[in-house]
Amino acid sequence: MKRKLEAEIESTRMELIIIAGQKGYSSIETLKISQVLDRLINEYNSREGMPGQLEWTEN
């Protein structure tokens, strides 16, 4: 699953670079792909357990 997610992140990143180059950084298409990439990266990081990530504890 980790490899699949990494491949999906990489292909979405490449798509973002291409679309941003064609349509500009503030186009709707670029922003939508950027949001997809953000979600993928967040999912990857949550599965990996980001080092140094703070956890909430109640006293």
Image (spheres, helix red, strand yellow):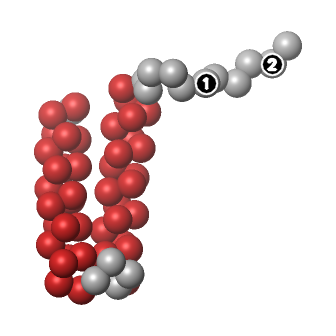
Q: What element carries label 2?
A: loop
- Residue 58: % across, % down: 81, 18
Q: Label 1, on which residue?
A: 54
Q: 30 above or below 39? A: below
- Residue 37: % across, % down: 32, 57
Instruction: Verify CB contact (< 8 Å) between mark 1 and mark 2.
Output: no
- Residue 55: % across, % down: 63, 23
Give 22 or 35, whichever is nearer the viewer.
22
Q: Is mark 1 on a helix, strand or loop?
A: loop
Q: In which quarter of the image is residue 20?
A: bottom left
Q: Label 2, on which residue?
A: 58
Kind of residue at badge 2: Glu
Q: 6 above or below 20? A: above
Furthest toward the right, the residue is 59
Q: Residues within 10 Å of mark 1 (few under 14, many from 20)?
A: few
- Residue 27: % across, % down: 35, 84
Kind of residue at badge 1: Leu
Q: In which quarter of the image is residue 30?
A: bottom left
Give 14 or 3, whichever is nearer the viewer.
14
- From the viewer's perspective, is 33 left or right of 49? left
Picture quarter with the C terminus? top right
Frontmost of labels 1 and 2 is: 1
Picture quarter with the N terminus? top left
Q: Which residue is drawn at 22% across and 41% down?
A: 5
- From the viewer's perspective, is 26 left or right of 20? right
Q: Residue at x 15, y 34 (%)?
A: 3
